[in-house]
Image (spheres, rainbow, N blue to C red):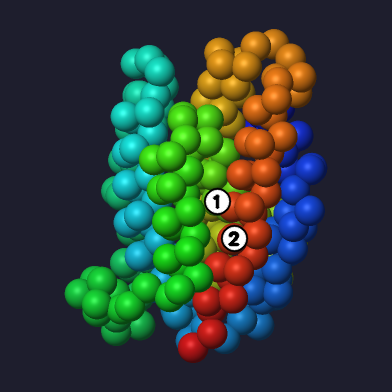
Amino acid sequence: MSYGQTFSQWRDAAPDWRDYTHHPFVEGMREGTLPRADFLTYLVQDYLFLIHFSRAWALAVVKAGDLEEMRACAATVHALLDHEMSLHVQTCAAAGIDVEAMTRTPEAMTNIAYTRYVMDAGLSGDFLDLLAALMPCVLGYGEIGTRLQCERLADTPYMDWIETYAGAEYQAACASAGRLLDEAIRKRLGPKPEDSPRWQQLAGRFATATRLEVAFWGLGKA
């Protein structure tokens, strides 16, 4: 599925994109060889990540330029808090890890580095800076989920995770995010954004967030 022109261009220019979307952790989920303890360690950290990620999308409501952008960002906050995080809660609960235990878990330094980078992009920059830092997570997981659904081994125990990110609801959110990014770029940089001096700066933010995603998979070590 295409998530828009801007994403495709930034994705193709990000040196670490394949390392992110084909990381050994990801391939372990596809093959079913990822140790369950490693998956749960990652999932707890990702739960903490999503709390801050939701705050960053809430900041995007503040940074947005019009009601259409505000509604799109607010819908993403709702999707994160009320849908995506439920996967983490349910999976961890089945393993005997309740929400209280998850919230008491210290954030890993890699987690702190990533989430605060995204927040800083929004606090020190504008709406486009924030979107550029947010998109590798949103759209990368959509791309990973779609690929794993097609390439997974039949007996992988990680079907719940794969189906969450390959599912119609998450894919619709990705399509919406891609349209939001394209339209925000068009409104602010014009019909030929690649000619703007900001283009490379924003692509650089996207690439940095991609590197942080690569590092985040490394949290899956029990």
Image position of 169 with respect to 221: above or below: above
Q: Position of residue 203 (x, y in %)?
A: 68, 39
Q: Amino acid at mark 2?
A: Glu
Q: Is disc 1 surrounded by few (<14), some (14 to 19) or many (20+) residues within 10 Å?
A: some
Q: Which mark is residue 213?
A: 2
x, y percent for residue 72? 40, 27
26 in relation to 128, above or below: below
Task: Give the amino acid at mark 1.
Answer: Cys
Left or right? Give the position of 30 relative to 134: right
Q: Looking at the picture, how far across and down is residue 209, in whole percent?
A: 59, 52
Q: Quadrant of residue 150?
A: bottom right
Q: Position of residue 152 (x, y in %)?
A: 70, 65
Out of 64 and 169, give the one closest to the viewer: 64
- The reply to whether callout 2 and callout 1 are in contact (CB within 8 Å) is yes
Mark 2 element type:
helix
- From what the image shows, is residue 86 above or below residue 171? below
- Residue sitting at 69 percent across and 29 percent down? 199
Residue labelled with disc 1: 137
**Residue shown at 67%/49% (left/top)?**
207
- What residue is drawn where x is 48% and y is 53%? 117
Left or right placement of residue 9 versus residue 48 in this view: right
| Residue 71 image label | none
